[in-house]
Amino acid sequence: MNKRLLTLAAALCIATGAPAQEPTLVFTPQWTAQAQFAGYYVAEAKGFYQEAGVDVRIEHPSPTQPAMARLRRGECQAITLQLCQAMEMADEGARLVNILQTSMNNGMVIVSARGMDPLTQKGAKVGIWSVGFGQLAICMSTQEHLDYDWVRFAQNMNLFIAGALDATLAMSYNEYYQLLQAGLEISEENVYRFCDHGYNVQEDGLYMTRAYYLKHQDQARRFAEASRRGWEWAAEHPEEALDIVMDYVERAHIATNRVMQRLMLQEILRLQVDRESGQREFRLRPDMVELASRLMVENRMLSREITYEELAQ
């Protein structure tokens, strides 16, 4: 279509009140295909995005192209981030807006070897993800004067299973179950759950750059609402949602199994229920933003306070 026809088409849209065609919204979760993102897969597979009038394309990241880098380069318009990650990006100058908060509780744990209590292992060698996600653990180690020796790993538990580490960070919906499937005996005495010890900071939320959000607010709203609908449907139909997850997993050639993904989905859905209200609230909590900001400023992970107002719509 030449420029003259494009101008005429735009004029007709204005004259008739018809909306201009919206751009495709590329959404990148922060990790490879798995039940952690079930609600988004459901929203796409069940046609919720289409019904909302949003053209969504889900593109997963790679080890060399993480979600945050893709957002910075404009290769996607929406990503999932843990709250602490979003605050780090905001501190670095990125203007982000949280359009949907799925996690209401923190799922990070420390698992210790040989039945030890993590809080008694001062100076222990503890595994931490090389791609991030461990901000809160580093804060806790400093606050509790544990002086952990952090050992970075890519994406599996092999170092810990082999006995090369005294303890390891794990997500209660992911690596924790990998350890159980590997045959390790784990009791509550050697598991430290951050959410139970004053470090209950929300994790996954759906973020856009504020510039894109302000230009496409209606699209962002409809995308968020359809995504929430996907999560609510997954909670009501977990086995059918799992069928959809496994389809995405198999297409992406991810090495996992249905048992693992079922456990992940169950735990993800549990973490979405607010402890105080007993409801899936899908909102960013100001008190948790304040807690995360204070801890990260005290531990010099942020150069300044990041406020709830900076991230909220």
Image (tube, rainbow, N blue to C red):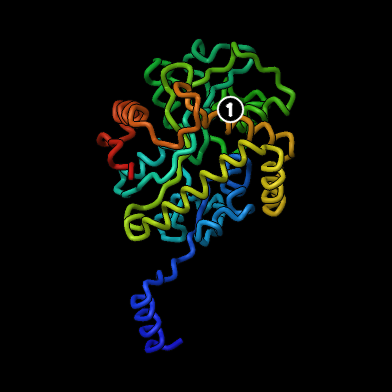
Percent coordinates x, y for residue 11 in the rendering = 34, 81
Percent coordinates x, y for residue 286 in the rendering = 33, 31
Q: Is residue 269 above or below residue 73?
A: above
The one nearer the camera, 304 or 288, is 288
The one nearer the camera, 36 or 41, is 41
Horizontal arrangement in the rendering, residue 159 relative to residue 119 (left or right)? right
Q: Residues within 10 Å of mark 1 (few under 14, many from 20)?
A: many
Which of the image's four quarters has the C terminus? top left
Residue at 42% over, 51% down: 221
Q: Is residue 83 above or below residue 221?
A: above
Q: Which amino acid does label 1 sit on?
A: Ser
Residue 299 visible in the current orientation: no
Horizontal arrangement in the rendering, residue 183 relative to residue 23 (left or right)? right
Percent coordinates x, y for residue 26 in the rendering = 50, 59
The one nearer the camera, 152 or 214, is 214
Q: Mark 1 points at which residue?
A: 172
List the single residue furthest toward the front. 16
The one nearer the camera, 312 or 15, is 15
Residue at 46% over, 86% down: 1
* Numbered disc 1: secondary structure: loop
Residue at 31% over, 29% down: 290
Percent coordinates x, y for residue 273 in the rendering = 51, 28
Residue at 46% over, 56% down: 70
